Amino acid sequence: MNGKAFDLVIVGGGLAGASLAVALRASRLSIAVVESRPPLRATGWDARVYAISPANAAFLRELGVWQHLDASRVCPVHDMAVFGDAGGRLDFSAYDSGLGELAWILEAGLMQAELWETLKRQHNVTLLCPATPQSLVLDEGGATLTLDGGRSIRARLVVGADGANSWVRQQAGIEARFTPYEEMGVVANFRCSRPHRNTAFQWFREDGILAWLPLPDNHMSMVWSAPDAVAQDLLALDAGALCERVAAAGGGLLGDFEVVTTAQGFSLRLMRVGRTVAPRVALIGDAAHAIHPLSGHGINLGFQDARALAGVLGALPEWRDPGELGVLRRYARERAEEPLLMQYTTHALNRLFNNRNPVLAAVRNVGLNLTNALPVVRNALIRYAVNGRF
């Protein structure tokens, strides 16, 4: 393995990195995926749950992954109700918009395991796992990546798919600016006594932003983006008290709860990077952008990064170097708008609803009600959520 050369090395075998490799399965490119540990299937329900847009479900279907997911663990969202903190409300309906579903809710581990199984069968992929990168040297002709144990590999392009604290981004000298929200995302799964009817709920509350995402068999995944002090209180509650607190916060809409996965918390922050490409380096997923979870678009952005970069690389003529900056800038241009729009939109919404000014409270809730009364505006928002564009 020492000194072996690849066209492309992907550092990070998570959802974004693995989907990029699978999207290039028909290309002439030789690919290495560097990952510290293989994915593990959760024994029960996975606490990490994502809302996948129909556009990204279609992407996973193109990859041959979606068809092999356990359908009993995937839940379509047919309706969504968003509540303001002073009487505002906004409703979305797949049926009214002529759609099959607004989104799909499923466990991260379910997608990760299926992507990984696909990678293991892929003829042009070498899995380097477990492996941890130690150094990255970029030169005019390519990149040398040294792994733990002294192994080294060469590549014409290195893709950083290694998360918000990206090691590749740091090694490439790409600056990232972090803005802490002084909030935590608290996640847990519950069984509900009343049917959710494939409806997602979201509340903008004084103590944070609470989302309930429907799961199969009348289960529900909670994401509560709360100020640090509130989040710590939630994490300290025993199972019974947590069920009561979460059920009451949603007005008892789904009846009584039973904890299925223990509550977990993670700090929230906004991350902006000065650029997503450099000579011989490209960033995708959370390595390129991190946004507030209130939009539910985090992994959707990562999948679209993978799709766009795979499209650029897969279309290259055989003589073209995939690590050329001119090539990578095509990807950067294609992905310049959507992540930036989502970052600023979610950041602005978070700041708007966290402001306790009574005048702003009236304005934001009137805005929700006004949007609810204008089908054209509401349907435009749905089209963006479904297709990633208006």
Image (cartoon, grey):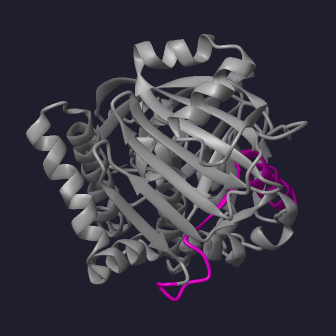
In this rendering, position of residue 245 left or right of residue 84: right
Q: Position of residue 378 (x, y in %)?
A: 33, 74
Q: Quadrant of the N terminus?
A: top right
Q: Position of residue 59 (x, y in %)?
A: 62, 73
Rendered view: 33 above or below 145: below
Rendered view: 55 above or below 231: below
Q: Is residue 26 visible?
A: no
In this rendering, position of residue 156 left or right of residue 389: right
Residue that protrudes farthest toward the left in the picture: 359
Q: Is residue 256 visible?
A: yes
Q: Quadrant of the C terminus?
A: bottom left
Which residue is rendered at x = 79% and y = 51% of the image? 110
Query: Which residues lie in the magenta part?
Result: 96-121
Which residue is rendered at x = 27% and y = 77% of the image? 377
- Numbered circles on residues, count: 0
Camera-side residue: 325 or 4?
325
Which residue is rendered at x = 59% and y = 53% of the image? 16
In this rendering, position of residue 135 left or right of residue 149: left
Magenta run includes residue 118 = yes
Rendered view: 198 above or below 88: below
Residue that protrudes farthest toward the right in the picture: 43
Q: Position of residue 344 (x, y in %)?
A: 24, 49
Q: Position of residue 236 (x, y in %)?
A: 61, 10
Magenta run includes residue 13 = no
Quarter of the rendering containing residue 180: top left
Quarter of the rendering containing residue 373: bottom left
Which residue is rendered at x = 32% and y = 27% of the image? 181
Camera-side residue: 248 or 92?
248
Rendered view: 104 above or below 171: below
